[in-house]
Amino acid sequence: MVDSARLGRLKFRAWHRGTREADFMIGGFFDRNHAAWGVAECDWFEALVEEDDVHIMAWAIGTETAPDRYEGPLMDAMRKLDYIHIHR
């Protein structure tokens, strides 16, 4: 079980990236998936959000190859891009 304080920090990091595009991609991914995460998935996401947004977004849309440490089911889920909802 992941404690709520850690999830709160991860949510803040996910939604405060610096650009709206990155917020929607990374924050939307967090919102869609975090409820099913355990410690390992939170560790993965915590490391991911330390990376530059340009790289995270490029890995998600497939214009760059993600490092091996990020490949796997979570990156596969991020690549679906079905979690981005833009509200006007």
Image (cartoon, grey):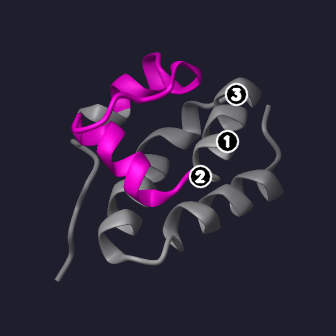
Quadrant containing the N terminus in the rendered view: top right
Q: Please say if 86 is above or below 51.
A: below
**What separation in Å lies between label 2 and label 3 (alpha carbons)?**
17 Å
Say few, some or many: other residues with alpha carbon within 10 Å of mark 3 (under 14 / 14 to 19 / 20 or more). few
User: 36 and 15: which one is in front?
Assistant: 15
Q: In whole angstroms, how far apart are the C-alphas of marks 3 and 1?
A: 14 Å
Cβ atoms at labels 1 and 2 below 8 Å apart? yes
Which numbered disc, 3 or 1, marks the residue that appears first in the sequence? 3
Q: Residue at x 49, y 49 (%)?
A: 30
Residues in magenta, as a range? 51-77
Q: Residue furthest left?
A: 88
Q: Identify whether 2 is placed above or below 8.
A: above
Identify the residue at horizontal 47%, vertical 77% (top origin): 18
Q: Which mark is residue 38?
A: 3
The amino acid at mark 3 is Gly
What type of secondary structure mainly makes up the magenta span? helix
Q: Which residue is mark 1?
A: 47
Amino acid type at mark 2:
Val
Q: Position of residue 83 (x, y in %)?
A: 28, 47
Q: Position of residue 17 (x, y in %)?
A: 50, 70
Residues at discs 3 and 1 in contact (Cβ within 8 Å): no
Q: Is residue 49 left or right of residue 9?
A: left
Q: How many marks?
A: 3
Q: Secondary structure at mark 2?
A: loop
Marker disc for residue 49: 2
Q: Secondary structure under badge 1?
A: helix
Locate residue 67, reporting x and y percent: 50, 26
Kind of residue sitting beneath label 1 = Ala
Judged by depth in the image, the label closer to the viewer, 2 or 3, is 2
- Considering the numbered disc 3 on the image, is that residue within a helix, a strand or a loop? loop
Q: Residue furthest bottom?
A: 88
